[in-house]
Image: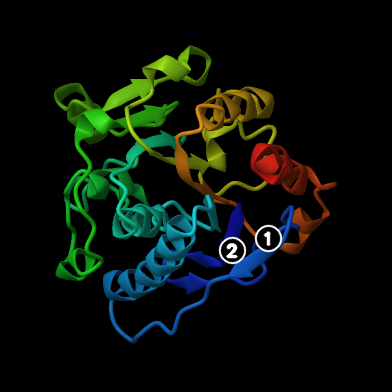
Amino acid sequence: MTILRVPYHLDEHLPDLWPPLPGAAQTVVAELPDGDVWSRMTVLHGVVAERVADHARAGRVPVVVSGDCMVALGAVAGLQRAGADPSVVWFDAHGDVQTMQTSTSGYAGGIPLRVLTGYRPDPATARLGLRDVAEDRILLVDGRDLDPAEEEYLRASALRVSAVPDMAADALPEGPLLLHVDLDVIDPGEVPGVLFPTPDGPSADAVVGAVRRVLETGRVAALSVGCTWRSDAELDRDGGVRARLLADLLAPLIR
């Protein structure tokens, strides 16, 4: 396992976002150009893609830990550059299947799953070289906070959905997997300071158990973890909750 620490939320560098990570981590930074958020993110995701591709070619499982879900685009592109054709298992409290036209907030971090299926919000995004992932090769786990446009899209699409308690290993899409876990999938009562808390979520233990079932298939080619929480000083005194959560999540890969 190789941990790639990507200290960004979208195109904003956030070097103080992190609790201690288990094991050694390599920090990924990029010289981002002046310009719009899409051009800047595309450069960052391209750097991530190259690092992921290098480790995947060497037979390692790269773990990308970042401050948002968009960096998972770089992880998928990296696996594709290394010759893999990954399916996607996506743990998230949100659907992440907005477009910039349907989003009521305009938040760029709400679109990555839709981008994986072929939506390109800006010409800059296409420069990443990301190949589309078929909808039926994507599993969204516990996306419970959905806007009407997302609900409509999911009803009409072949994208699979599941709740954490119902997720069975034999229901996973075929082939090598990009496993993505946005930590806000966990009930916010157990994870301090998440940016977009969504109540009535599964417990940390339930999510860690479900993630381990995916890892136990031996088909996870890369793991992406979205630490979508605040980094203020008060949260640095959370009693180690976030650090323990990351350690539990990554433990099967460290052993």
Q: Residue at x 51, y 44 (%)?
A: 196
Considering only order in the chain, which callout, 1 or 2, is on the residue closer to the N terminus? 2
- Decide: is 212 above or below 128: above
Q: Nearer the viewer, residue 178 or 96?
A: 178
Q: Residue at x 18, y 64 (%)?
A: 126
Q: Position of residue 182 (x, y in %)?
A: 51, 43
**Picture quarter with the C terminus:** top right
- Decide: is 78 above or below 199: below
What is the three-letter code of the residue carrying label 1?
Trp
Decide if residue 188 is on the left or right side of residue 29.
right
- Decide: is 99 above or below 32: above
**CB under 8 Å between callouts 2 and 1?**
yes
Q: Position of residue 105 (x, y in %)?
A: 32, 51
Decide if residue 150 is on the left or right side of residue 34.
left
Report whether residue 13 is seen: yes
Q: Which residue is mark 2?
A: 5
What is the three-letter code of the residue carrying label 2?
Arg
Total numbered labels placed on residues in the image: 2
Q: Position of residue 228 (x, y in %)?
A: 54, 51
Q: Residues within 10 Å of mark 1 (few under 14, many from 20)?
A: some
Q: Which residue is mark 1?
A: 18
